[in-house]
Image (cartoon, rainbow, N blue to C red):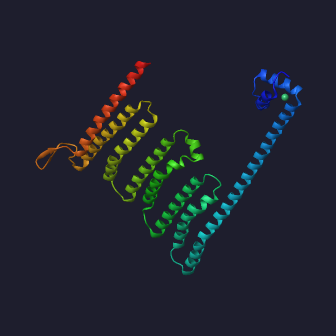
Amino acid sequence: MRYECELIRDLLPLYQDGICSPSSKTAVEEHLGECDGCSSYLESLRSGEEIEQVIAAEKNEALDSQKKFFKRRSAVAGTIIAGIFMLPVLICLIVNLAVGGAGWFFIVLAAMLIPVSLVAVPLLAPENKGLWTLSSFCISLLLLFAVVCIITGGSWFFTASTASLFGICLVFSPFAARSKPIASRVGGHRGLAVLGLDTVMFVLMMISIGITGGLGLGYYSLAGRISLPIIGLVWTIFLTVRYLKLNRSFKTGICLGSASLMMFIHELLLDLSANSTSFYIRTDSDRYVFGTNILFGAVLMLLALIFAGIGFIANRNRRKEK
Ligand SMILES: [Zn+2]
């Protein structure tokens, strides 16, 4: 025999997986033809792998059946919980029918849907539990607003709905955007989708407040002047940080600069309406002083220029190195 058994046995696992070099392969095969001990060692290696495969298959089967078991149990628990919540609804329906009167039973029904959406839906939903819970919670909340509004003859439905949805979006839309069905649609633009949704909800809320309150053009003009510069700043910072291909100092400069610009624009827009004198030099107990916002804005602008300068120098140095 040209090679020692020890050497060949070291090579056998590689040989079995088909990843050894052609020359090792020839050496192993040559040796196996001559050595019964190494041939049976190879056999034992093969059967060991088979056993591993059987164990893995059994493990997967056990996990699957356990998963199914828990799914079934949570579905049963969800149904029972939903049923328990519906008991008071049933009692209220009977009492409401017995005494007659306005349909306050519907208020109870709609109110009960909220805990059901929070407790039973996560147990009943087969997958995307978070998204199902959030959606069913929002729908039951809107339903409750609608029912109470109709029964009490209120006109605040749209204001309450848009304000609640805006708040919910602000907190939960970043999490919802991570769920499979939404993430697969928005791809790498999750932040854009979340900020877009928040902006739309905010605008809807402001419009609803104006309509419900019967407020005139003055309200929309003031609301726009207060909120548009802030929304613009949020968008500028987001787009700069997320999408602009510049170095960090430049980006910091742009963000600080736009914050400063926003403060000036804000002051200017408010001054147009409210006779506020904060933008201009004003007399304050016979002394000329600047509005504090303007001073703060000027400091921000100075910082922005410093950062942009650092970014510019860093860029030029990098280009020189290349
Ligand atoms: Zn051998």
Q: Position of residue 224 (x, y in %)?
A: 34, 47
Depth check, front residue: 285 or 48: 48
Q: Residue at 89% across / 31% down in the picture?
A: 36
- Residue pictured at 86% horizontal, 34% vertical: 40
Q: Position of residue 209 (x, y in %)?
A: 39, 56
Total number of numbered discs in the rendering? 0
Of residues 143 and 260, the one drawn nearer to the viewer in this rendering: 260
Residue 109 vs residue 118, the one in the foreground: 118
Is 76 rendered above or below residue 65?
below
- Quarter of the displayed picture in which ligand 1 can be seen: top right
Q: Tell me the residue at 41%/30% (across/down).
A: 247
In the displayed structure, 265 sits above or below 217; it is: above
Point out residue 7 in the picture as x, y percentages from the top left corner. 78, 27
The answer to whether 253 appears left or right of 108 in the picture is: left
Q: Quadrant of the N terminus?
A: top right
Q: Quadrant of the C terminus?
A: top left
